[in-house]
Amino acid sequence: MYPEETITLDCPSCKVAISQPLSWFRETYSTCPHCGGGLAASQFAAQLDAIEAAFDDAVEEMVRGEPSPGGCCCNKK
């Protein structure tokens, strides 16, 4: 089993960066480790969906051995 990816997102209340595993941000309710403010999963949903899509694209690129469409220009012919 691989360790879960740690991501960093800003607290909506105090704006301080929170570095936690992705699943921590998906919890229904958590508390900011800096200000103690309540955090709901819905506050991070759009950002987490984009991050997970980027992870999936990176995995697909590794499996296929080529960049995803619209990806990096490094492999241009």
Image (cartoon, grey):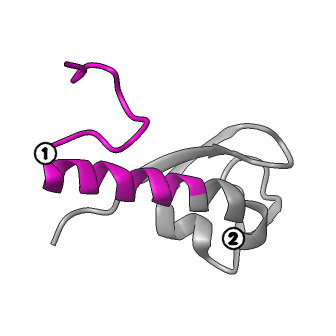
Badge number at residue 44 = none
Q: Residue at x 49, y 62 (%)?
A: 22
* Residue 5 shows up from this direction: no
Residue extent of the magenta highlight: 50-77
Badge number at residue 65 = 1
* Label 2 environment density (alpha carbons within 10 Å; few <14, some 14–19, many ≥20): some
Can you say whether 14 is above or below 72 in the image?
below
Image location (x, y in percent) of residue 40: 77, 71
Q: Quadrant of the C terminus?
A: top left
Closer mark to the observer between disc 1 and disc 2: 1
Q: Which residue is mark 2?
A: 30
- Specify whether 28 is left or right of 13: left
User: Which kind of residue does numbered mark 1 sit on?
Assistant: Gly
Q: Are marks 1 and 2 in contact (CB under 8 Å)?
A: no
- Specify whether 43 is left or right of 21: right
> Helix, strand or loop at disc 2?
strand
Residue 54 colored magenta? yes
Image location (x, y in percent) of residue 64: 16, 53
Front residue of this view, candidates 35 and 47: 47
Q: Residue at x 17, y 49 (%)?
A: 62
- Specify whether 43 is left or right of 6: right
Image location (x, y in percent) of residue 38: 81, 66
Q: Residue at x 38, y 42 (%)?
A: 69
Front residue of this view, candidates 22 and 29: 22
Q: Image quarter for residue 29?
A: bottom right
User: Which kind of residue does numbered mark 2 sit on?
Assistant: Ser
Can you say whether 43 is above or below 77 in the image?
below
Taking the view exactly as shown, the residue that stands out farthest to the bottom is 28
Residue 57 colored magenta? yes
Q: Image quarter for residue 65?
A: top left
Q: Quadrant of the N terminus?
A: bottom left
